[in-house]
Image (tube, rainbow, N blue to C red):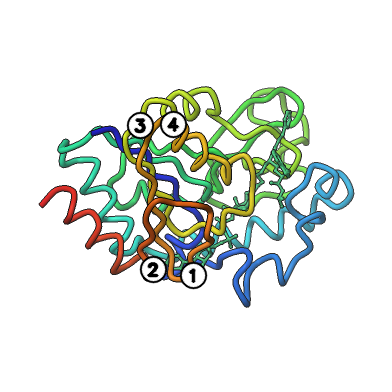
Amino acid sequence: MKIVVLTGAGVSAESGLGTFRDEDGLWTQYALEDVATPEGFARDPALVHDFYNARRQNCLSSAPNPAHFALATLQKSKAHEVVLVTQNVDDLHERAGSLDVVHMHGRLLGALCADCDARWDVAAAMAVDDPCPSCAAPASRPDVVWFGEMPYHMDEIMADLETCDLFAAIGTSGTVYPAAGFVDLARQAGAHTIEINPDPAGGGFDAVIAGPATTAVPDWVKSLVG
Ligand code: BV8
């Protein structure tokens, strides 16, 4: 069976990384327009770097949780073909052992040159005047997809959705497009669709497992790999 899994901030919530739209979520502390849009970056790059530097530190001091490990087990079991797509920019899936994670919204531990498109890994804080290692322009930005920018790997993701048998959305509010529309594409392709979320978003899934990721995901994976 071919399975496409889409994760959102909820899969990392119990690792201590904030979500966006829950009660004390990131979008209640920062205006999305100021820190997650190209216009916000042009207006105040230092604020945007501060926002991502804080999240990068938070990410580096956190650890994968049982949900991340269970998804890595599902991939490595080879019981099914598994495509893991994440909206998250943290590296907890990788640190739990997942391979080929499709980061459609980019990576906190990646940097991008706004001038020459060069990409490189970063673990430390980024600053406005950091020179690009390729063209030396002071145009470094976090390699994340902001609102109004095209998510990464869309062709690959669409092809996988059109050919999957099972689509599982884990820990996402189904608010942000195009990710929020993936369930419809999977259903149109004939896939069974399932949502795992303690507070289901109600996006017309065939099945819902209402529970936190750290217990619901390991149980779900056990049901797939025995
Ligand atoms: C684009 C950056 C076009 C990195 C993010 C229709 C079609 C297409 C676009 C649009 C459209 N309508 C509107 C748009 C524009 C926009 C959009 O969707 N706006 C929304 C607000 C309406 N979309 C875009 O701009 C996208 N780009 O469409 O480009 C284009 C075309 C041609 C050429 C150029 C461009 C780009 C979207 C990406 C934006 N970047 N992040 C970063 O800072 O992280 S999005 C941001 O939201 C994060 O990436 C996050 O992952 C994502 C989604 O949020 P969730 O992951 O779902 O998190 P949330 O807090 O919302 O929910 C948490 C969930 O977890 C909850 O359900 C909760 O119940 C659950 N939970 C809590 N605890 C647990 C749990 N679950 C399990 N266990 C727990 N313990």
Q: Position of residue 36 (x, y in %)?
A: 73, 51
For badge 2, the amino acid type reads: Ala
Q: CA distance from mark 3 to mark 4?
A: 5 Å
Q: How many neighbours does mark 2 have within 10 angstroms: few (below 14), some (14-19), or many (20 or more)? A: few
Ranked by sequence position, the earlier of labels 4 and 2 is 4
Q: Which residue is mark 4?
A: 161
Residues at circles 3 and 4 in contact by the CB criterion of under 8 Å: yes
> In the displayed image of the protein, which residue is found farthest to the right?
43
Considering the numbered disc 3 on the image, is that residue within a helix, a strand or a loop?
loop
Residue type at mark 1: give it: Asp
The label number, if any, that marks residue 199 in the structure image: 1
Residue that mark 3 sits on: 164
**Relative to 16, is 85 above or below?**
above
The answer to whether mark 1 and mark 3 are in CB contact below 8 A is: no
Q: Earlier in the sequence, mark 1 or mark 4?
A: 4
Residue corresponding to mark 2: 210
Disc 1 and disc 3: Cα gap in Å?
A: 25 Å
Marks 2 and 1, the one that precedes in the sequence: 1
Name the quarter where the N terminus is drawn.
Answer: top left
Q: Quadrant of residue 145?
A: top right
Pointer 2 with pointer 1, Cβ within 8 A: yes
